[in-house]
């Protein structure tokens, strides 16, 4: 009998893209004809559920009330060597709990889809406390030193143009693979269905359809933008993907517009709504941009989170 290959994914729910990337990759490995056993752990949740809750709530509060401050913090780590001492202290605090998970699962490969996982595992390998191949999947269209550690064996990036940026951090070019971001297979399945047919499946009207998205957290100036777009369109339907933002969903339901308005909460079938749309207006999250490219949808980018998303936006505008 073939040996089962165990793959451990380290991720975090701080921003939905990291967890979604891990789930997509894990699902792909679990369906592979060779035997794979996969496990996904939230690195901060594993260390401390309370800390995970505090970090997530603090992050969301920062994005809502002081996004520029977050952008300034993020940009401090765009250069090599920045923040390495602080990161190493954090690595050593968290690593004992992560080692327990590794000892329990005995993986043959570790894959990181969150920056902290990358540096924790890299640090353990560099200190000779761990001898397991490790790869990191960077889930944005930019490079930040938080992701980088010389102990990681291989990096997977979203585009070929990112290779020289990663090489600036002294990562050997042979250890960098530009394979794109992991997009769920359902997007390829959705692409095979015409927008008109998809509208029928979703019981939408057959008319010009615009989709507004603020990511899984439903962030951004969506209400104001919907109001402005409504004034210049007629005979259209405006879909608002509110994610987990209950306040946005409630406010959207109360909004008076001249076009048909359809706000909806978080759904696992966002691929269908995207394919049913003629145009998408969205925040520039890394995975969202990749999904739009798979569906070949025209899009406008709004309300980027300063830091990772503003850099994603810059990359797309400059890469055409």
Image: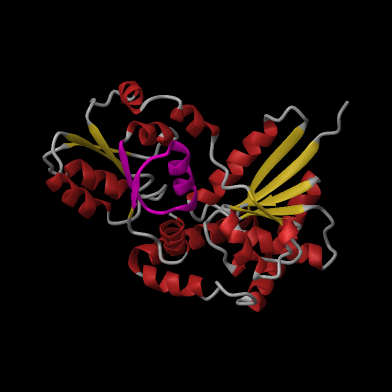
Q: Residue lying farthest right?
A: 1
Which color mode does the image show? Answer: secondary structure
Left or right of 169: which side holds 66? Answer: left
Up the image or down, 272 lies above or below 313; here it is: above
Residue displayed at 34% across by 28% down? 195
User: Which image quadrant is residue 169 in?
Assistant: bottom right
Q: Closest to the observer: 285 or 57?
A: 285
Q: Position of residue 21 (x, y in %)?
A: 57, 45
| Residue drawn at point x = 28 percent, y = 48 percent | 248
Q: Can you give x and y, in whole percent of width and height, for residue 87 in the image?
A: 64, 72
Q: Position of residue 23 (x, y in %)?
A: 59, 41
From which residue to which does the magenta span run? 278-300
- Residue 205 x/y as whole percent: 23, 26
Q: Is residue 241 visible?
A: no
Quarter holding residue 224: bottom left
Q: Is residue 284 magenta?
A: yes
**Looking at the image, which is closer to me, 275 or 13?**
275
**Vertical order, 177 against 33 (above or below):** below
Q: How many marks?
A: 0
Q: Is residue 181 left or right of residue 169?
A: left
| Residue 259 appearing in the image | yes
Work out whether residue 118 or residue 181 is closer to the camera in this orientation and state it: 181
* Vertical side of 124 occupied by 30: above or below: above
Residue 191 located left or right of residue 155: left
Q: Quadrant of the C terminus?
A: bottom left
Say whether residue 262 is left or right of residue 100: left
Q: Is residue 11 magenta?
A: no
- Identify which residue, 179 or 74, lies in the foreground: 179
> Who's the residue at 21% across and 41% down the image?
253
């Amino acid at each position: 009998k073939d040996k089962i290959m165990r793959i451990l994914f380290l991720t975090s729910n701080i921003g939905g893209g990291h967890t979604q990337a891990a789930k997509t990759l894990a699902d792909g490995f679990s369906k592979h004809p060779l035997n794979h056993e996969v496990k996904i752990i939230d690195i901060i949740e594993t260390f401390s559920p309370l800390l995970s809750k505090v970090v997530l709530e603090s992050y969301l509060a920062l994005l809502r009330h002081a996004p520029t401050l977050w952008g300034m913090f993020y940009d401090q780590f765009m250069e090599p060597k920045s923040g390495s001492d602080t990161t190493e202290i954090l690595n050593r605090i968290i690593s004992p709990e992560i080692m327990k998970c590794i000892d329990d699962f005995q993986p043959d490969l570790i894959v990181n889809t969150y920056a902290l996982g990358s540096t924790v595992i890299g640090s353990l390998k560099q200190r000779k406390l761990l001898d397991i191949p490790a790869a990191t999947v960077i889930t944005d269209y930019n490079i930040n030193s938080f992701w980088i550690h010389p102990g990681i064996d291989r990096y997977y990036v979203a585009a070929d143009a990112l290779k020289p940026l990663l090489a600036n951090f002294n990562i050997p070019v042979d250890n960098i693979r530009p394979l794109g971001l992991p997009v769920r297979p359902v997007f390829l399945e959705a692409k095979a269905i015409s927008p008109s047919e998809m509208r029928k499946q979703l019981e939408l009207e057959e008319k010009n359809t615009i989709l507004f998205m603020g990511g899984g957290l439903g962030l951004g100036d969506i209400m104001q933008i919907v109001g402005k777009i409504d004034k210049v369109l007629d005979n259209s339907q405006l879909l608002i993907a509110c994610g987990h933002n209950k306040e946005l969903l409630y406010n959207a339901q109360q909004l008076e517009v001249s076009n048909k308005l359809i706000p909806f909460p978080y759904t696992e079938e966002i691929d269908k709504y995207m394919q049913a749309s003629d145009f998408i207006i969205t925040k520039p999250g890394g995975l969202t941009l990749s999904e739009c490219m798979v569906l070949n949808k025209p899009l406008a980018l709004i309300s980027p989170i300063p830091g990772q998303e503003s850099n994603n936006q810059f990359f797309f505008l400059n890469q055409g």
